[in-house]
Image (tube, helix red, strand yellow):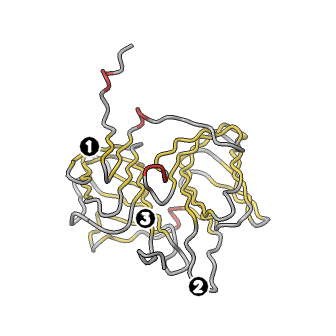
């Protein structure tokens, strides 16, 4: 069978990656049973974090991250239980959790499930306030208009402040709505399209994007998004945050 003679929307440039589902490759990771991983971005490409989609069979278990690594989870589908700090939490679609570095925990799938996993080494400050475990549901977080535009709503899934060294948001665009500017900044992004679609400018390139696509944006990559179609477009987006560029 000819696979469209190598045709794909996926694209890798010096300052960005668009990775579409037709190019996803599953891989196992050591010490993890009945879970396959799509590693979307990792330090091998120059990123300061890892973003993966974990695909759990029923009964699959994800053990704790390495000692110095903090972890964020967002459930795309399925039912799971998170056990952390001697407490068991039930997670289903749109639930999320932040697990601080050094926290013993495991994530077990009750049914087949898909979960976004973000991991990075915690970049601490000389602060007496360590990060704490967070477990919640996206829709319990009030949404806020971005730049006063009620048709572009943001939910902040992580607290803000010097304790926290990254942010994760969901952003929902009504059809025809776009970012008000092309952004160029020091933060890098990992982005997973959850619903709908539109056009993404990355660097000097414009790409059609749709639900299921992953995007990595390096620091200073020019970026802009506009929603197209008849339904809202929504994505989950990560950025490093609240740390000096020299590491302080």
Judging by the rendered image, the residue that carries numbered circle 3 is 239
Report crowding for label 3: few under 14, some 14 to 19, many 20 or more residues within 10 A (C-alpha): some
Q: Which mark is residue 126?
A: 2
**Residue 23 x/y as whole percent:** 41, 34
Q: Are marks 2 and 3 in contact (CB under 8 Å)?
A: no
Establish if 233 lies above or below 133: above
**Residue at position x 47%, y 68% from top?**
167
The span from disc 2 to disc 1 (Cα, nearest Å) is 44 Å
The span from disc 2 to disc 3 (Cα, nearest Å) is 22 Å
| Occupied quadrant, residue 178 | bottom left
Q: Are marks 2 and 1 in contact (CB under 8 Å)?
A: no
- Identify the mark nearer the N-term, 2 or 3: 2
State the quadrant of the N terminus.
top left
Judging by the rendered image, the residue that carries numbered circle 1 is 208
**Residue 130 x/y as whole percent:** 63, 78
Q: Secondary structure at mark 3?
A: strand
Mark closer to the observer (2, 1): 2
- Identify the mark nearer the N-term, 3 or 1: 1
The span from disc 3 to disc 1 (Cα, nearest Å) is 22 Å
């Amino acid at each position: 069978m000819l696979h469209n003679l190598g045709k794909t929307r996926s694209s890798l440039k010096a300052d960005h990656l668009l990775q579409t589902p037709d190019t996803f490759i599953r891989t196992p990771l050591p010490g993890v049973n009945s879970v396959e991983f799509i590693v979307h971005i990792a330090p091998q490409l120059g990123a300061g974090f890892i973003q993966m989609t974990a695909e759990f069979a029923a009964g699959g278990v994800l053990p704790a991250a390495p000692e110095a690594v903090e972890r964020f989870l967002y459930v795309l589908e399925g039912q799971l239980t998170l056990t952390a700090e001697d407490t068991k939490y039930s997670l289903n679609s749109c639930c999320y959790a932040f697990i601080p570095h050094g926290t013993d925990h495991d994530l077990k799938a009750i049914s087949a499930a898909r979960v976004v996993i973000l991991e990075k080494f915690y970049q601490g400050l000389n602060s007496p306030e360590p990060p704490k475990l967070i477990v919640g549901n996206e829709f319990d977080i009030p949404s806020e208009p971005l730049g006063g535009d009620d048709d572009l709503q943001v939910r902040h899934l992580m607290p803000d402040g010097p304790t926290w060294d990254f942010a994760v948001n969901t952003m929902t665009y009504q059809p025809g709505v776009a970012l008000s500017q092309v952004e160029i900044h020091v933060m890098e992004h990992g982005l997973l399209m959850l619903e709908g679609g539109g056009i993404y400018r990355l660097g000097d390139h414009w790409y059609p994007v749709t639900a299921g696509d992953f995007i990595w944006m390096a620091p200073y990559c020019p970026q802009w998004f506009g929603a197209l179609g008849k339904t809202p477009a929504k994505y989950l987006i990560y950025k490093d945050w609240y740390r000096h560029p020299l590491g302080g």
